[in-house]
Amino acid sequence: MKTIAVIKTGGKQYIVSEGKVLTVEKIESEVGSKLEFDAMLISDEEGSDVKIGTPIIDGAKISAVITEHGRAKKVSVIKYKSKSRYRRNVGHRQPFTKIQINKITV
């Protein structure tokens, strides 16, 4: 039976299961280091056994490992004002961290 959980990191919430690889906001740790997240919601695959935290579930932990750090593709931020010769083109690459979920403990 597959367990599904909801975690919060980097100001966002993610639906995770064991073995899933996620791209999240940058986490300041080395590649290969282990992480633990608190679960906000845990459910089985059918949705029959659901535990909802307020805001987290006591004793529930999700263990993960950092697999990679990187930067996303470039996004162009263009500013333009008509009739005033004002044009700006600035690029931005958002840093990210890839993590792999190892175990969900209830």
Image (spheres, rainbow, N blue to C red):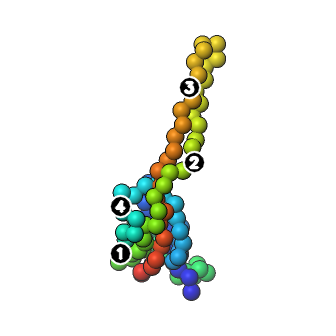
| Residue 29: mark in rendering | 4
Q: Name the outermost residue toward the right.
A: 82
Q: In the image, residue 20 lies at what x, y percent?
A: 54, 72
Q: Quadrant of residue 104?
A: bottom left
Residue 104 vertical placement versus 9 (above, below): below
SS category of the residue bearing label 1:
loop
Please name the residue that numbered disc 2 is placed on. 73
Between discs 2 and 1, the one toward the N terminus: 1
Foreground of the two, 33 or 81: 33
Please name the residue that numbered disc 1 is placed on. 58
Q: Amino acid at mark 1?
A: Asp
Q: Amino acid at mark 2?
A: Lys
Q: Residue at x 43, y 72 (%)?
A: 64
| Residue 88: mark in rendering | 3
Between discs 3 and 1, the one toward the N terminus: 1
| Residue 3: mark in rendering | none
Q: CA distance from mark 3 to mark 1?
A: 50 Å
Instruction: Count residues near mark 2 (Cα–Cα under 10 Å), then give few for <14, some for 14-19, many for 20+.
Output: few
SS category of the residue bearing label 2:
loop
Q: In the image, residue 94 lies at what x, y percent?
A: 49, 47
Between discs 3 and 2, the one toward the N terminus: 2
Foreground of the two, 52 or 88: 88
Q: Residue at x 37, y 71 (%)?
A: 34
Q: CA distance from mark 3 to mark 2?
A: 19 Å
Q: In the image, residue 49 lies at what x, y percent?
A: 53, 82
The mark closer to the camera, 2 or 1, is: 2
